[in-house]
Image: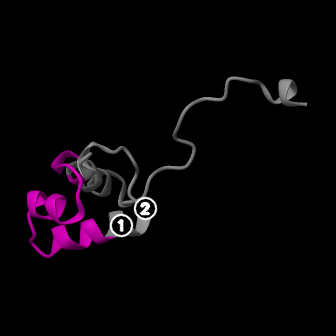
Amino acid sequence: MSTMSQRSHLTDSEAWRVVGRLERGQTQAEIAQAIGVSQSVISRIWNRFLDTGSAGRRPGQGRRRAKTPNEDR
């Protein structure tokens, strides 16, 4: 199985390294190949940085809980 087909998030520090490489002039394709992700991952990190000023993921993203807090008791 290739690295690109496995789905896992880059850490915040990896995302910031991507931003740094882009700011130094490296292409999205070069970075993607170097770290083993698709170019679209690099593009999303860059767009998030341009929109929010942060390269990290927002907290609270992910699958919703199936139970309410009362049901957990």
Label 2: few (<14), some or many (≥20) within 10 Å?
few
Badges 1 and 2: C-beta atoms under 8 Å apart? yes
Quarter placement of the C terminus: top right
Extreme front residue here? 1
Q: Where is residue 11 in the image (x, y as percent from the top left)?
A: 43, 61
Instruction: Name the residue carrying label 1.
Output: 14
Q: Which residue is drawn at 36% across and 44% down?
A: 7
Amino acid residing under circle 1: Glu
| Magenta span contains residue 32 | yes
Foreground: 2 or 38?
2
Q: Position of residue 42 (x, y in %)?
A: 22, 54
Whole-angstrom CA distance, mark 1 to mark 2, is 5 Å
Q: How many labels does the image show?
A: 2
Range of magenta residues: 17-42
Amino acid residing under circle 2: Thr
Q: Is mark 1 on a helix, strand or loop?
A: helix
Q: In this view, does 25 lie to the left or right of 48?
A: left
Q: Where is residue 4 in the image (x, y as percent from the top left)?
A: 24, 48
Instruction: Name the residue carrying label 2.
Output: 11
Foreground: 2 or 42?
2
Label 1: few (<14), some or many (≥20) within 10 Å?
some
